[in-house]
Amino acid sequence: MLKDKISITPEQFVELARVLPEPMLLLNSEGEILASNKAVTKMLGLAYKKLQNKMLFDVVAEPLNKVIQYLQACSRSRQMVLGCLSFYQDDGQTSMCCRCEGALFQPSSPHSNATILLRLKSRSLASNNFLLLNKKIDESMAEIALRQSEALLRQKAKDLEETLDELKRTQSKLVHSEKMSALGRMVAGIAHEINNPVSFIYGNIVPASLYAQDLIRIIELYQKHYSKPPKEIEAEIEAVELDFIKQDFVQLLDSMQHGTERIKEIVISLRNFSRVDEAEFKKVDIHQGIDSTLLILHNRLKLKSNHHEIEVIKDYSSLPKIDCYAGQLNQVFMNILANAIDALEDEVKKNQNFIPHILISTELSDKSNIVIRIADNGSGIPLSIQSKLFDPFFTTKEVGKGTGLGLSISHQIIVDKHHGKLSYLSSRGNGTEFIIEIPICQK
């Protein structure tokens, strides 16, 4: 079975056969001589070029049909087929009668004819050495087959490893894609449901404020023209503190208007963050995406009982709009900022006097790229895990608090989807800075 899988070129045959003393030819089933060793040329007294790429029936005295019949017999048998051929000498007149032993060396394929090994022996010499020749050839063939099998196994192992890596990457993409798709739909749905009642309230606050001002003016007119109302009315005015109500009612409506405006801003930020309707590249303001993400994370940044407010310092440069998948880029900002907040919260647990902050800066690195830097003043990333930072499913967080997909997917979004770069700088005790570089225009 091994022999059927051996693939050998004429050059390899010559390399194999040159150390053997027996004359040998390699030819295909059509009779074309593919290669010969030195022992053949020496025995026949012919130059190598006299045989190379010649047809067998052009260099022997036997009739064409006899030569073809012999080759057909050899191409069907793995056992040596005996024959007799008379090879022309250099003068083209005399010939040397040789004993031939031919056998199938390599079967035919859709791309090539069968290959035949032909061993020659002058009929005047003894043929006892053929057994030794068979043994040497079999040993050489077995060695070639072993080398090819080992190479095949190594290649299959490498292919399997690459397939497993690709499967792991694909799995992480599918998990994250489904997760972010569901999150995007949920956020967009919540934003839509909040937007309707808020819009109703916001739209009615202005006329309500006008109505309140009209009522207050009428009350003031009554107080002006009827300065001495009945005692019952005077008692009620004093009980409800009418003067305070007149001042506070308008302020209350103004506060409600500011509150609804804030809610509308949050709704717009939610919709900007999810961007479920933006599946293609489009030009966006990168600062708007960062601000929307910060608004989503506002609850984690504000002052709490167990830690100071995480201060966000912005250092924005004047940037043009860039071509990007806006929703996916917001996911990158979310992943990096969430990791920074986690790191700062861990640091606060160790030191209650620690003052956490995050610095976000943007700049134009050249005419074709922008750079976004997100840095925290936490304890930094341990050197032992830095090489695994972008590996899928690698996480240092507790079970249930992290999937290990955030930075891996972020790397794919920046590098694969946006043809940019995602790198980081971190040293123990000096915090971590992630650097995002993205082309302004995508090709």
Image: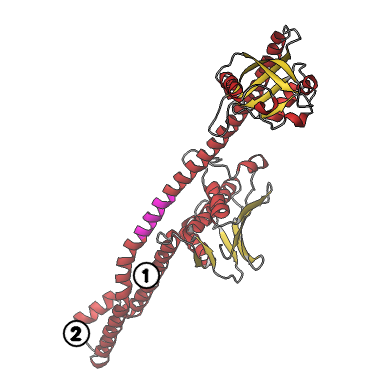
Q: Which residue is mark 2?
A: 230
* Residue extent of the magenta highlight: 179-190
Amino acid at pointer 1: Thr
Q: Is residue 262 above or below residue 212?
A: above
Callout 1 secondary element: helix
Near-viewer residue (245 or 297)? 297
For residue 374, the mark is none
Left/right of residue 228 with respect to residue 119 in the rendered view: left
Callout 2 secondary element: loop
Residue 153 x, y percent position in the rendering: 60, 26
Query: Does the image show residue 231?
Result: yes
The residue that appears at 26% across and 83% down in the rendered structure is 215
Query: Does the image show residue 146?
Result: no
The residue that appears at 32% across and 80% down in the rendered structure is 246
Q: Main secondary structure of the magenta part?
A: helix
Magenta highlight on residue 194: no
Q: Is residue 20 above or below residue 289?
A: above
Residue 211 x, y percent position in the rendering: 27, 82
Q: Which residue is mark 1?
A: 260
Residue 434 x, y percent position in the rendering: 62, 54
Q: Quadrant of residue 318?
A: bottom right
| Total numbered badges shown on the rendered structure | 2
Q: Is residue 124 above or below residue 160?
A: above
Q: What is the crowding at mark 1: few (fewer than 14 residues within 10 Å), some, or many (at least 20)?
A: some
Near-viewer residue (214 or 376)? 376
Please state which of the two labelled residues, at mark 2 or mark 1, is closer to the viewer: 1
